[in-house]
Image (spheres, rainbow, N blue to C red):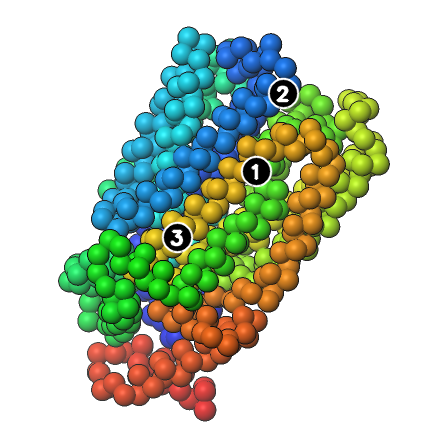
Amino acid sequence: MAKLGRVEDRPTPEQVYNWKVYANSIIATWAAVMFGYDSAFIGTSISLASFKSEFGLTTKSTTEFNLISANIVSVYQAGCFFGAFFGYLTGYFLGRKYGLLLSSAIFLLGAGLQCGANSSTGLGIMYAGRIIVGLSIGIASNLAPIYVAEIAPPAIRGRLIGMYELCWQLGGVVGFWINYGVTQHIPASHKQWVIAFAVQLIPGGMLFVGSFMMIESPRWLVSRDRNAAALTNLAKLRNLPEDAPYVVEEFAEIEAAIAHERGLAGAGFFGPLKTVMRSRTLMYRILLGSSLFVWQNGTGINAINYYSPTIFKSIGITGTSTSLLTTGVYGLIKLFGALIWLLYLVDSFGRRGVLLAGSLGGAISMYYIGAYIAIAKPAEHPSTKIGPGGQSAIAFFYIWTIFYSPTWNGTPWVIGAEMFPQHVRTFTQACQAASNWFWGFIITRFTPQMFTAMGYGVYIFFASLMIISIPFIYFILPETKQVPLERMEELFEPGMKPWKAHGIVMARVHESRLARHDAAPESPASGSFEKARAEERVETV
């Protein structure tokens, strides 16, 4: 277990798995802390009595309050949608490092505006701050997974991209618990609700400072014809000399892949767009990657993240403190699930397997909750004591979380960062991130109205979407685990069956590397790397 289940696609020097690649990945994934916190704290914050009193919401009808709360939540998603496309612009011209730096600066501006909202300014400045923060998150959600995918060694690429998911959940845990803490220790006042908004400044500031220390992506530098700097950065990230066989081989693969992609696309800002429009397989991959976020939102995750008080009220949980406590436990389970996914699942069991398991287990849980609410009608019989049926419904809610967190929460981001060539990756990632935010906007904007109109049917609706996603994943989505980024397009060759593609492509990768090594002259400086290559050939005979 020393390598946490690491499976290498070729003999790899231990120096490659060094602190630099992890540190740079952690800095980039602080963007996910910003996102995770914002997705968690806002729903419970606007349910606080102090927040409602500050902005005159206590006198609003249920319909009016639902509309205002939906607007506060959904304008953030709208900002994220447009930010995802702006991320393509910044990623192309500024690179991954300075794109994330810009994103964090925008985030700090938006968070500051939200903290400045009060009864005198009204909700206008709050809406503005939420949109600006959303714009920042849209940029970061585009660039952070791409950056990590580009600097990561193949054997731990899924795990490092998965750190995005882990940081997301860390931010979420703080966001879910922050309002429980302030309600327990701070009297209802302006200070009570503004603390949760001010905490946004911490992850934003961490990313802003950390961005100055990041090593720019070698793949992006090669795409901008800065090959010398790219080789230097690659050697730094691999903790090896520039002439080390592993670095030379990887750099040659990067150069060859980008030269090939340029030959197809041509240079320039619109080159990736032209490439995608001319390529059926790339259009198909964009549709496939974007569809994953349809299914992800179809699990009901954003309805739960942003409207957890409404969710728990429908099950029969009453009282603000109890609801916030239950939400906090939900956040802890999500964090634990993300750790399991990151350390053991994503690079060991692959992407397809975890998604299939998540859909099946999540659907069963949602069906049970919907059936309980339909039969027991807990909202019509409120009580401070939850009976056995209600307790089992809460248990199945947590079971749903156990299935969702280590599967659907982070895996679509990993796949989306992997399956496109370098020259179009920033553009395609923008499209997929925009898909996530668009469907998130739809869910968050209409969840309150869905609960009013459908009641228990909301749970049946989400459960049914999860069931429908199972054949989609099995028959349409190929496995991307450990496939080198430069060989990813082979998974989508005409006639390739998605459920068989991974085995076929990995066999080709293995054969081509052995052939390339056999053709290369022997170097006395190769050391243990060359010895491992020789041992690999013996083992395959």
Tell me if residue 528 comes above or below residue 352 in the rendering: below
Q: Amino acid at mark 2?
A: Thr
Is residue 160 or residue 501 the one in the foreground? 501
Secondary structure of the residue carrying tag 1 is: helix
Q: Does the image show residue 257?
A: yes
Say whether residue 394 is left or right of residue 17: right
Instruction: Please tell me the numbered disc located at residue 266.
Output: none
Tell me if residue 42 comes above or below residue 472 in the rendering: above
At 44% across and 35% down in the image, what residue appears? 78
Say whether residue 319 is left or right of residue 274: right
Q: Which residue is mark 2?
A: 63
* Measured Cα–Cα span from mark 1 to mark 2: 17 Å
Say whether disc 1 or disc 2 marks the residue closer to the N-terminus: 2
**In front: label 2 or label 3:** 2
Say whether disc 2 or disc 3 marks the residue closer to the N-terminus: 2
Q: Residues within 10 Å of mark 1 (few under 14, many from 20)?
A: many
* Measured Cα–Cα span from mark 3 to mark 1: 21 Å
Q: Amino acid at mark 3?
A: Gln
Q: Which residue is mark 1?
A: 443
Instruction: Please tell me the numbered disc located at residue 429.
Output: 3
At 47% across and 47% down in the image, what residue appears? 435
Secondary structure of the residue carrying tag 2 is: helix
Tell me where residue 327 sits by quadrant.
top right
Residue 237 percent location from the top left of the image: 28, 59
Q: Residues within 10 Å of mark 3 (few under 14, many from 20)?
A: many
Task: Give the total of numbered labels.
Answer: 3
